[in-house]
Image (tube, helix red, strand yellow):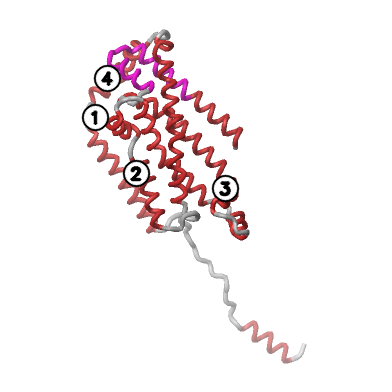
Amino acid sequence: MTTANINNKSHVENIPQVNTMTHVDKEWQRFTPSERIARFTIYLCLVSAIMWSWQTVEVIPEFLYDAPAQFADLFERMMPLDYAFYPEFIHEAMIETLNIATIGTLFTLIFAIPLALLNAHNITPNKTLNWIAKVFLVSSRSVNSLVWALLFIALFGPGLLAGIMAIAIRSIGFVGKLLAEALEEVNVGPIEALRATGASWMSILLKGYWPQVMPAFYSIVLFRWDINVRESAVLGLVGAGGIGVILNDAQNLFEWQKVAMVLVSIFTVVIIAEAVVIHIRNKLI
């Protein structure tokens, strides 16, 4: 070993060793302090709103404690069911209920489809028309079907027409909004290809948009019809026809066995309607 190597080795050994690996203890936290404060504020506001709402309800404790006994007494009055009441009154009224739901759903499409086209930004790029369509859709959804029924009873009088109009106007916002969202989510490739060939607006709509939104359209309509069957069952409580009229009359006369028969009939029809909707969806989609 030469003298230069010995000197270099001695110089290296004299250099203090510095630890380049520094260890820093870090505590992992799922949320930042600001996020924890925001979550706590939201929870506090939610609990406060629930407590405030409960105080404004003004529940009478005596009625609340007595509810189980009253329910048991009412159940005893409903038994046994008055099966003879079904063919005499319930069957015809149930057919009227189904007619209200079906015709109201079909009548909805007359207004819901144009409003959906106006509300879809990729089909109607005019913001003014989008806003106008959105106002109609929101207005339809914001009013309950019973309120619409009361309004149309004042216009057309009590009966099936008021119920059909109430179901139709109430359903416009639901069908139109979901259909507009389906139109906005289509694949733009076929649309651009049709435009490049010089296809007309109607051809683009029928050949480009419709094949893509057809499954969603059928699902929306069938789902809304299922909802309308349930809603039309109570429209008769305000005089808009259907099984609700029979239910209201039986309840006012304290004929609880007939009331129970009406409720069982409504429950059965709703279950059958649900099964029918599922079967049709599986066949069409």
Q: Secondary structure at mark 2?
A: helix
Which residue position holds label 4? 66
**Residue 267, image x, y percentages:** 44, 21
Q: Which quadrant of the view contains residue 129?
A: bottom left
283 in relation to 253, above or below: below
- Of the residues shown, which amino acid type is indicated by label 4? Asp
Nearest to the observer: residue 24 or residue 252: 252
Q: Is residue 258 left or right of residue 193?
A: left
**Residue 125, image x, y percentages:** 46, 58
Which residue position holds label 2? 139
Task: Check if residue 44 falls in the magenta segment.
Answer: no
Which residue position holds label 3? 206
Residue at screen point 42% across, 32% down: 104
Q: CA distance from mark 1 to mark 2?
A: 32 Å
Mark 1 or mark 3: name the one nearer the start of the chain.
Answer: 1
**Residue 84, image x, y percentages:** 41, 8
Nearest to the observer: residue 123 or residue 266: 123
Mark 1 or mark 2: name the one nearer the start of the chain.
Answer: 1
